[in-house]
């Protein structure tokens, strides 16, 4: 039985990750425009702070 490290899928994953890392290192993209994904990082933070989902009313 093959281990996970010797399977072709793992090599493809590492190759793809290295390609994307090199692409970002060379082009150095900057996020300068608003997108709908910007606020997604706030949701987990608010869940931890309020002990409730971030859409919940803070007074309850």
Image (cartoon, rainbow, N blue to C red):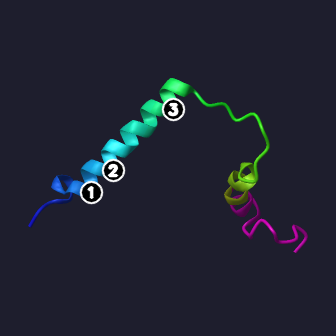
Q: CA–CA distance between discs 1 and 3?
A: 22 Å
**Occupied quadrant, residue 51:** bottom right
Q: Which residues are magenta?
A: 45-60
| Residue 24 disc label | 3
Q: Which residue is mark 1?
A: 9
Determine which residue is flagged by label 2: 13
In reply to whether residue 58 is colored magenta, the answer given is: yes
| Badge 2 vs badge 1, beta-carbon distance below 8 Å | yes
Asked which secondary structure carries label 2, the reply is: helix
**Mark 1 or 3, nearer chain start:** 1
Say which residue appears at 25% left-offset and 49% top-offset.
11
Q: Give the CA separation, mark 2 to mark 3.
A: 17 Å
Residue 46 pos. (x, y %):
74, 59
Question: What SS does tag 3 mark?
Answer: helix
**What secondary structure characterizes most of the magenta part?**
loop
Residue 43 numbered mark, or none: none
Q: Image quarter for residue 30?
A: top right
Query: Which image quadrant: the C terminus?
Result: bottom right
Q: Position of residue 38 (x, y in %)?
A: 73, 48
Nearer-N-terminus badge (2/3): 2
Is residue 14 rendered to the left or right of residue 5? Answer: right
């Amino acid at each position: 039985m093959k281990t996970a490290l010797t399977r072709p899928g793992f090599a493809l994953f590492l190759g793809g990750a290295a390609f994307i890392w090199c692409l970002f290192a060379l082009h150095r993209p900057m996020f300068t425009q608003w997108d709908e994904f910007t606020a997604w990082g706030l949701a987990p933070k608010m869940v931890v702070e309020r002990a409730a989902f971030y859409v919940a009313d803070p007074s309850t």
